[in-house]
Amino acid sequence: MEKMMKDWSSTTDCHAWVERPDGSIKDWFFCDYDTIIRVQGLEKGIPVYMPDDKYHETCMRQVRTKIKEIKNSGLPMFKKPKDVIKFFYDQPAAGNCFMNAYAYCYFNRDCKLRIGNFGWAKKKRTKNINTWFEFGDADMKEDWKYYYLKYPANEKLDMEIVGTGPWNRPYIADSAINAAAVERGVSKEDVERMRRKLAEMIAEEGTDGIEIVDGITISPEDVKSDEGIESIIRREYKKRKTGSV
């Protein structure tokens, strides 16, 4: 089911998180964020949230559509809408903040789904930007402390780190398949077939590696490396083209 998470990822430029009854924030930290923080020169320990209700209707429409599409995907584990919601509750997925937050609120009815802007404090001001909102369209010229005062929940953040295990990052499989598709020039139908095959294999935990496509296997060590899954796949194809071992 790592299958299609990227296809079904959030498309609206905003972020969703959970606000608990005590006013604290529940959210998930994915390894993608480390790259954003490094490239943009941000303070990793200072996430900044700013709600904006204008996104709510669009977000909920995408959630309903996504649940329906996944339920109708043909994967046997998704017989009912609740099965889809439970999947995201048990395994929050990168690029799916709407579903992650919605699922948490579904099983914790006293919590509130919040949608808006999300980013980090900048280490140094650059071009009058003091706060970097990776998601959303908030004015970035104010200092991060300004947003903390406007939304007190910023000070009560429970950020759960996700993605420490090799098969707990749904975008990994998709990245590998995308790379294979680029190299092979395959059709959309062929990519879909590969994703379905991978979804079945990746459901078996404890494996030493997973054959992505054309005999190319991704191991836990590959996942932990700095090279990146797409680079590994393309390197393997290049070896085959040049005849190197």
Image: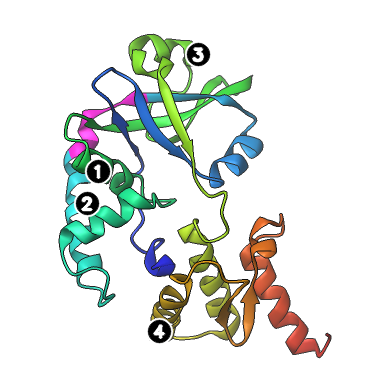
Q: Earlier in the sequence, mark 3 or mark 4?
A: 3
Q: Residue at x 55, y 67 (%)?
A: 206
Q: Is residue 7 left or right of 169 when viewed as pictured? A: left
Q: Earlier in the sequence, mark 1 or mark 3?
A: 1
Instruction: Point out the stretch of residues depicted in magenta.
Output: 50-56
Q: Earlier in the sequence, mark 2 or mark 1?
A: 2
Q: Are marks 3 and 2 in contact (CB under 8 Å)?
A: no
The C terminus is located in which quarter? bottom right
Say what secondary structure mark 1 lies in: helix
Q: Amino acid at mark 2?
A: Val
| Nearest to viewer (mark 2 / mark 1) | 1
Q: Is residue 89 above or below residue 109?
A: below
Say what secondary structure mark 3 lies in: loop
Q: Which residue is mark 2?
A: 63
Residue 14 image label: none
Q: Are marks 2 and 1 in contact (CB under 8 Å)?
A: yes
Q: Amino acid at mark 1?
A: Tyr
Q: Which residue is mark 3?
A: 143
Q: Amino acid at mark 4?
A: Arg
Residue 108 seen in this snapshot: yes
Q: Which residue is mark 1?
A: 102
Q: CA distance from mark 1 to mark 3?
A: 30 Å
Say what secondary structure mark 4 lies in: helix
Q: Which residue is mark 4?
A: 193
Q: CA distance from mark 4 to mark 2?
A: 24 Å
Q: Is residue 188 above or below residue 8?
A: below
- Residue 37, image x and y in percent? 60, 35
